[in-house]
Image (spheres, helix red, strand yellow):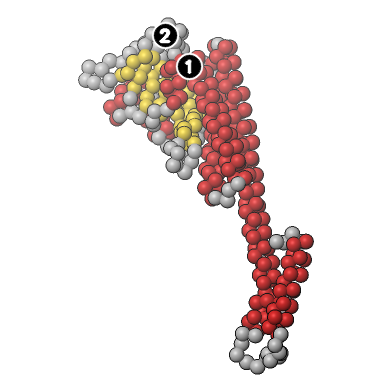
Amino acid sequence: MLHWFNEETDAELKVTADFEWPPSATWIQVVAPTSAELDFVAQHLQVPDYLFQDVSDEDERPRLERDGDIALIILKVPAPMQAAAELRFRTLPVGLWLLPQQMVTASAQPLALWDELRGQRQRGKALHVRGLLAEIFQAIARDYLRALRIINTEIAATEKILRNSQNNNEFFRLLALNKSLILFSSALKGNISVAQQTMRLPLLKQDEGDLEDIADALIDLQQARDMTEIYASTITNMMDAYVGVLQNNISNTLKIITAWTVVVAAPATVASIYGMNVPLPLQNWTYAWPVLMGGGFAISGMLFVIFRKRDWI
């Protein structure tokens, strides 16, 4: 799917036999393109084929490549997953092909990032590559901060559940959040590096305002990176504490079971011995059974008192 934008236009491009490239397009948005659309974009804007291969690879790392006045930028953006998915968030690559007067943005699937940028577009407002590039960096930073707020809320909710639960589901939920944070950390480090390189592009030196906007976005990205590290550390500590609590609960349970086993062992031993079909001492004494069993219960009572004082039962 292709969209093109300028100060007045937000329109979808249909690749047909009589297709004409809009000469005034400042921003061309390419989302999940067909082979025909790829051919037209490559023909009119000299976009390399590997750009669309890169944005289709979730493992692609952020980078910036320059060739004179033309630049290729790969960034990673957060994307929420379905509730039943193994991960809470993943990171997807987006590609930017910068020309002096035009920009091509590419992604392998529709993203909330593009909807947000299109929603911010004001018809009649000047649209140029420098300002659009700054808006993209700012929107990506906002997406990460929003995703991190969601993760923080889920961490707090899971922590409350863990206080009264020994279910493995909460543990795996924390593990999924931690995996998302690891992806965020790697993506943010790459995005920050690319943002720093982008600020040195000759294109941005033409306008101090756009340069300051990218600098602000860089600060937000660094804040998101710091928050990611803090939340990842929090989850790691919670998981370690959870494992420690489980081990402590198991130890307490085994201690209680062992203590009660010792308490009931004395009368059980007497009953077992005098239940054997062999000659035994005092077997002909009238009071042998109550005396011996009473002694067994007395020993059990003393053991119970001792264990109770030591808080074993």
Q: Which residue is mark 2?
A: 123
In the rendering, at what x and y percent does residue 85 appear?
Answer: 44, 42
In the rendering, at what x and y percent does residue 69 appear?
Answer: 47, 19
Q: CA distance from mark 2 to mark 1?
A: 14 Å
Q: Which residue is mark 1?
A: 132
Which residue sits at x=52%, y=18%? 134
Which residue sits at x=39%, y=31%? 108
Which residue in the rendered view is the most extreme toward the front? 286
Circle 2 sits in a helix, a strand or a loop, which is it? Answer: loop
Q: Of residues 104 and 11, which is closer to you in this image? A: 11
* Amino acid type, label 2: Arg
Image quadrant assignment for residue 142 = top right
Asked if residue 274 lies left or right of residue 177, the reply is right
Asked if residue 231 lies left or right of residue 285, the reply is left
Circle 1 sits in a helix, a strand or a loop, which is it? Answer: helix
Pointers 2 and 1 in contact (C-beta within 8 Å): no
Which residue sits at x=30%, y=29%? 34
Where the N terminus falls, by quadrant?
A: top left
Asked if residue 170 can be seen in this view, the reply is: yes
Of circles 2 and 1, the one toward us is: 2
* Amino acid type, label 1: Leu
First in residue order: circle 2 vs circle 1 = 2
Q: Of residues 167 and 63, which is closer to you in this image? A: 167
For residue 126, above or below residue 36: above
Asked if residue 137 can be seen in this view, the reply is: no
Q: Residues within 10 Å of mark 2 (few under 14, many from 20)?
A: few
In the rendering, at what x and y percent does residue 287 appear?
Answer: 71, 85
Image quadrant assignment for residue 311 = bottom right
Which residue sits at x=63%, y=32%? 226
In the rendering, at what x and y percent does residue 8 appear?
Answer: 38, 8
Where the C terminus falls, by quadrant?
A: bottom right
